[in-house]
Image (cartoon, grey):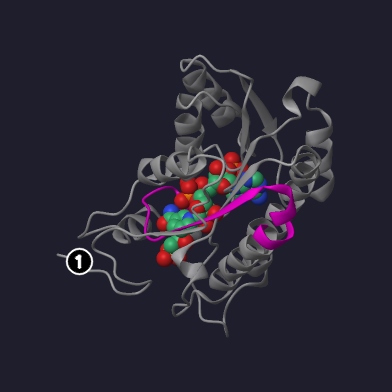
Amino acid sequence: MEKKIALVTGATSGIGWATSVALAQLGYHIIATGRRQKRLQDLQKEISKEGVDVLTLNFDVRDQVAVKDAFSTLPDSWRKIDVLINNAGNAHGLDPIQTGSLEDWDAMIDINVKGLLYVSNEVIPGMVARNSGTIVNIGSIAGKEVYPMGNVYCASKHAVDALTKGMRMDLNPYGIRVIGVHPGLVETEFSLVRFKGDEERSKSVYKGFQPLTAEDIAETIAFAVSRPAHVVLADIVMLPTAQASATLVKKNL
Ligand code: NDP
Ligand code: 8X3
């Protein structure tokens, strides 16, 4: 088989880690990216068991220069990226708009929106030149609905949804598939980051019902990516059965 390469951002944890493993199991060679170098090394060890090659790139998606520099180090044999998983992202805080922190707002807009664009900007020209490729943008139920105190996080994920649709239109002439995956509640490090390391508060988000796992999402991404070239699963909203909307979750507490 011709070498197929998938690049996953935010591969050091949660959905990105599980997706890197799932795509390796499909035979993709993996470019795993994130800020935590030790985690990237651990992932590299785990994925190597699947018999594929793994290359790690250590950069902060907020840093435009660092993104460019990281891509410039890619050896020629790793430049033909077939699949891009734009996954890096987080919520920072859960506060009403009147008391929200500017630092949190900057983080969410810079990482979830601008970071996704910086990475896409490095990968899309190659896909266009080759008239092929698959891009998966990880949005959220927060990109389909707004919930109290979700304000800026929801705005950032609505932007991801808009960019997904825009990419699908602009890249349509080149046969590039663009897929939006919009999960509801998935138990990862997401809430730990949102609540700034408060483990108790973070665990309470997932109490009383069965949340999705990172592997549930990864399995769906792998399924979408592995459809025949003429099929695009354009817009996937994936919720735990206990969740009916962004705010309606059946909990047995
Ligand atoms: P995690 O916190 O477990 O993972 C987030 C990943 O993003 C980490 O690998 C982290 O890597 C990376 N990341 C964060 N900030 C940066 C940055 N500045 N530069 C580079 N990488 C960064 O959360 P999830 O796996 O749950 O989140 C993955 C995606 O899924 C996000 O886009 C999130 O918004 C979305 N999502 C999550 C849901 C959930 O309920 N968990 C539901 C819907 C969507 P590192 O810190 O090493 O840089
Ligand atoms: C993560 C899901 O509902 O916590 O995007 O915002 S939610």
Quarter that holds the N terminus: top right
Question: Could you tell me if residue 166 is visible in this image?
Answer: yes
Q: Going by the image, does 53 lie left or right of 190?
A: right
Residue 97: give x, y in percent of width and height.
56, 82
Quarter that holds the C terminus: bottom left
Circle 1 residue:
251
Q: Is residue 37 above or below residue 119?
A: above
Q: Going by the image, does 157 lie left or right of 61?
A: left
Q: Is mark 1 within 8 Å of ligand 2?
A: no
Q: How many marks?
A: 1
Q: Tell which residue pokes out farthest to the left in this image.
A: 252
**Magenta-colored span:** 168-193
Front residue of 62/78: it is 78
Question: Could you tell me if residue 193 is visible in this image?
Answer: no
In reply to whether residue 188 is colored magenta, the answer given is: yes
At 44% from the left and 48% from the top, the residue drawn is 189
Front residue of 173/246: it is 173
Q: Amino acid at mark 1?
A: Lys
Residue 199: give x, y in percent of width and height.
38, 52
At 52% from the left and 68% from the top, the residue drawn is 143
Residue 154: give x, y in percent of width and height.
54, 71
At 78% from the left and 49% from the top, the residue drawn is 121
Q: Quadrant of residue 2?
A: top right
